[in-house]
Amino acid sequence: MVESIREDVRMWLKPGDVVMPLYLGECGECLICKSGKTNICNVHPINLNGLMRDGTSRMSMAVIGETAYHVFSCATWSEYTVFDVNYVIKVDPRVPLPHASFLSRGFTTGLGAPWKEAAVTKGSSVAVFGLDVIGVCALIFTPTIRTEL
């Protein structure tokens, strides 16, 4: 949940909004973002260095006084964290919070893998290995893209 926002941040977010962190940012303006085929943005790529875009970390381990690093821009194991606005998406307020948690990884990967990555089509056969939340979502959504399990 958004607690506070810098003044220069886009106005589509406000305190109290529920957001979901993304490890792949989106600018919404580059050719790749506008294509609708992927969310691997040229402007906001996956961040593997553990720091914000300005090269700093906004977190520390207070007990020992050391810097704590973000994982893929999504340091979600802390009570509070700082996100680049391009690495979050606003959750529709009509979605109950327990249901919203499934959208973050299980739903997007379970639907996205067969639909976008594997590009399965009618008549395709699909095997799902593992029935964690991703596998279950793949089982639920793969038939909706007209495939055979």
Image (tube, rainbow, N blue to C red):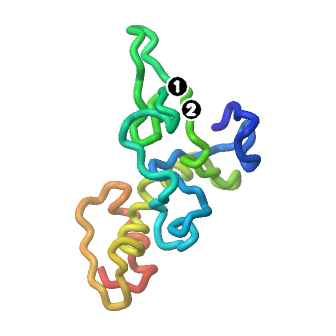
Residue highlighted by disc 2: 82
| Quadrant assignment for the C terminus | bottom left
Identify the residue at image location x=58%, y=48%.
86
Distance from Cα at disc 2 to Cα at disc 1: 7 Å
User: Quadrant of residue 128 in the image?
Assistant: bottom left
Q: Is residue 17 left or right of residue 132?
A: right
Identified by mark 1, the residue type is: Arg
Q: Earlier in the sequence, mark 2 or mark 1?
A: 1
Residue 54 at what x, y percent from top left? 52, 34
Q: Nearer the viewer, residue 13 or 51?
A: 51
The amino acid sitting under disc 2 is Val
Q: Which mark is residue 58?
A: 1
Residue depicted at 53% across the width and 26% down the height: 79
Q: Quadrant of the N terminus?
A: top right
Question: Vertical placement of 121 versus 47: above or below?
Answer: below
From the viewer's side, name the closer residue of 17 and 39: 39
